[in-house]
Image: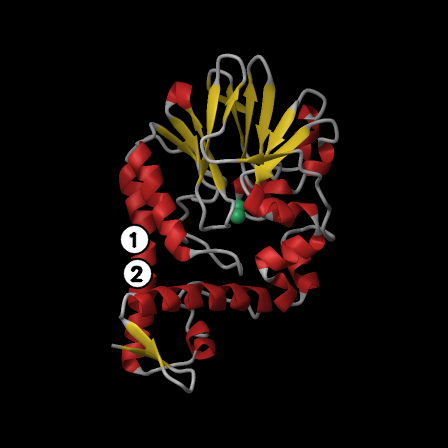
Amino acid sequence: MREIRPGVWFIKGENRGRYPYAHSLYFEDGETLLVDTGAGPFLKELSDKTGQVVLSHYHRDHVACNHLFAGASFSIHEDDAAGVETMEGFLSLSGLDQVDIESYWKIVKQSNFTATKIDNYLREGDSFDLGRLKIQVLHLPGHTPGHCGFLIENYNTVFAADIDLSTFGPWYGNASSDVVQFRQSIRRLRSLKPELLITGHERPVEDEIDQKLQAYEAVLDQRDQDIIAALKRRPATLKELSEKNIIYRRHYGQEVLLYFERNMIQKHLESLIIRGMVIKTEDGLYEAL
Ligand SMILES: [Zn+2]
Ligand SMILES: [Zn+2]
């Protein structure tokens, strides 16, 4: 744990916070609050003194150790709540009922779904007053519908969870993800001009935050262009496009990754159709205009 600002502790996740782990944030002020529980089982050392746990979104890499905080109250945005409350909700939000779920549990190093009882729903603009620290909820949808970030007003610092500035770029592979909202959320984050940006998977960033967010957003444009270039060479079905490794460099023969790739490509195609750059023919072929 590292005190990154007075009262604000950055908890580096196992495997440097890379999937299926994620960084957490811990606030120790008049009250204590933990954001996300995916850093690793070592979070147990905080279980006795944590009053509340706030979840950025429902993904398993951010909620894996919820069970260690039986005495705490839990909050998450309403649009993501079902994803931690029940297995059915998790499958419906993620779309993972479409694939071999056992292989998915292996990827996230969990044996199955464990449910969390949610006590409060987070809403855009809500704030937590922990004493001196004031933390504002930012609803930043796209990655998941209820994905939230948190603005620590005292330090103009944002925890942006999975708007994570990874070189991979934005991820929106679930049934309920939305690429258009993801772009809007990146722009909203840029408009806040944070001085320190903490994410779920990368190192905290203090320099050139706006340029880095811009580059992260530009990955979306590159994917649009790659899809259009492929369709200009030859019209293709969604399945054919999904096998061209436009999003993931490799699928390692994993059905789950192919499924995520197909979802992400489909979301691009839908937005390209709305923008009049692609059409879908009656026989299911996509063509660039
Ligand atoms: Zn996520
Ligand atoms: Zn994550």
Residue 254: in sight, yes or no? no
- Which element is circle 1 on? helix
Q: Quadrant of the C terminus?
A: bottom left
Residue 221: in sight, yes or no? yes
Q: How many marks?
A: 2
Q: Quadrant of residue 209?
A: top left
**Residue in the image at 41% along x and 53% along y:** 168
Q: Is the C-beta of the residue carrying label 2 under 8 Å from the nearest atom of ligand 1?
A: no
The amino acid beneath tag 1 is Ala
Disc 1 and disc 2 in contact, CB within 8 angstroms: yes
Asked if 150 appears above or below 212 in the picture, the reply is: above
Identify the disc placed on residue 222.
2
- Which element is circle 2 on? helix
Asked if 78 appears above or below 221 in the picture, the reply is: above
Furthest-left residue in this view: 289
The amino acid beneath tag 2 is Gln
Task: Give coordinates of residue 256: x percent, y percent.
Answer: 58, 65
**Residue in the image at 68% along x and 37% along y:** 66
**Classed neighbour count for the residue bearing mark 1: other residues with Cα under 10 Å, few (<14), some (14–19), many (≥20):** some
**Residue in the image at 45% along x and 72% along y:** 242
Identify the disc placed on residue 218.
1
Task: Give coordinates of residue 10: x percent, y percent.
Answer: 51, 27
Query: Between 120 and 168, which is closer to the camera in this rendering?
Result: 120
